[in-house]
Image (cartoon, rainbow, N blue to C red):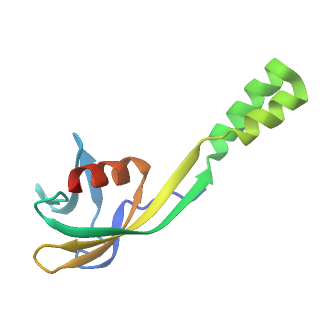
C-alpha cells in the first residue's frame, strides 16, 4: 500500500517534510523553523495528480465483519467498501518566486486548500 510522503519532492525546499499542526500546514525547514503554507506565502497552487487507493487493512476488516453478519455476500460487500486513501501531488508557487512540488495525504491536502483560500 503506497503512502503519501508528506514532503517536498521537487523544486525549492526539496526533501523537506510537509507537516500539519493545529490546522496549519507548513514546510519544516529545521529545528523550530518552518514556512507556513497559507494565503500570505502562497501565490498559487495547482493539483497535478490525485490517486485514490483502497486501504487493505480497512478492506480486510470490513470484509470480516460483513462475512460474520451476512455471510459471503456481506464479506464481498465489506471488502468492496474499503476506505479510499488519497495521495495528492500539488505544485506551489510562492509569492517570493520560489516553486515546490509537494506529495501529501488527504488530511494535509484539505488543510492546505483551506489555508490558501
Q: Position of residue 64 (x, y in %)?
A: 76, 29
Instruction: From the viewer's perspective, tell me whether residue 114 is left or right of residue 74.
Output: left
Residue 63: name its quadrant. top right
Compared to residue 93, the image places residue 38 above or below, namely: above
| Residue at the front extreme of this rendering | 117
| Residue at the top extreme of this rendering | 69
Q: Nearer the viewer, residue 100 or 39?
A: 39
Residue 84 visible from this viewpoint? yes
Compared to residue 48, the image places residue 32 above or below, namely: above
Residue 25 visible from this viewpoint? no
Instruction: From the viewer's perspective, tell me whether residue 31 is left or right of residue 91.
Output: left
Q: How many marks?
A: 0
Compared to residue 35, the image places residue 43 above or below, namely: below
Q: Position of residue 4 (x, y in %)?
A: 46, 59
Residue 69: name its quadrant. top right
Query: What residue is at 55 percent from the left and 61 percent from the top?
Result: 51
Q: Nearer the viewer, residue 28 or 80?
A: 80
Residue 26: name its quadrant. bottom left
Query: What residue is at 29 percent from the left and 62 percent from the top?
Result: 17
| Residue at the right extreme of this rendering | 72
Query: What residue is at 74 percent from the left and 25 percent from the top?
Result: 65
Query: What residue is at 28 percent from the left and 75 percent from the top?
Result: 100
Location of the C terminus by quadrant is bottom left
Q: Position of residue 34 (x, y in %)?
A: 14, 59
Q: Position of residue 83 (x, y in %)?
A: 60, 41
Instruction: From the viewer's perspective, tell me whether residue 20 is left or right of residue 110.
Output: left
Q: Nearer the viewer, residue 114 or 107?
A: 114
Amino acid at each position: 500500500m503506497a503512502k503519501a510522503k508528506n514532503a517536498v519532492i521537487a523544486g525549492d525546499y526539496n526533501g523537506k517534510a510537509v507537516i500539519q499542526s493545529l490546522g496549519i500546514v507548513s514546510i519544516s525547514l529545521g529545528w523550530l523553523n518552518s514556512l507556513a503554507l497559507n494565503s500570505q506565502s502562497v501565490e498559487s497552487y495547482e493539483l497535478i495528480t490525485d490517486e485514490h487507493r483502497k486501504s487493505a487493512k480497512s478492506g480486510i476488516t470490513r470484509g470480516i465483519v460483513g462475512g460474520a453478519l451476512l455471510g459471503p455476500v456481506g464479506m464481498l460487500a465489506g471488502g468492496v467498501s474499503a476506505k479510499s486513501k488519497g495521495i495528492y501531488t500539488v505544485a506551489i508557487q510562492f509569492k517570493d518566486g520560489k516553486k515546490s512540488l509537494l506529495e501529501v495525504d488527504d488530511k494535509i491536502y484539505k488543510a492546505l486548500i483551506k489555508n490558501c483560500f
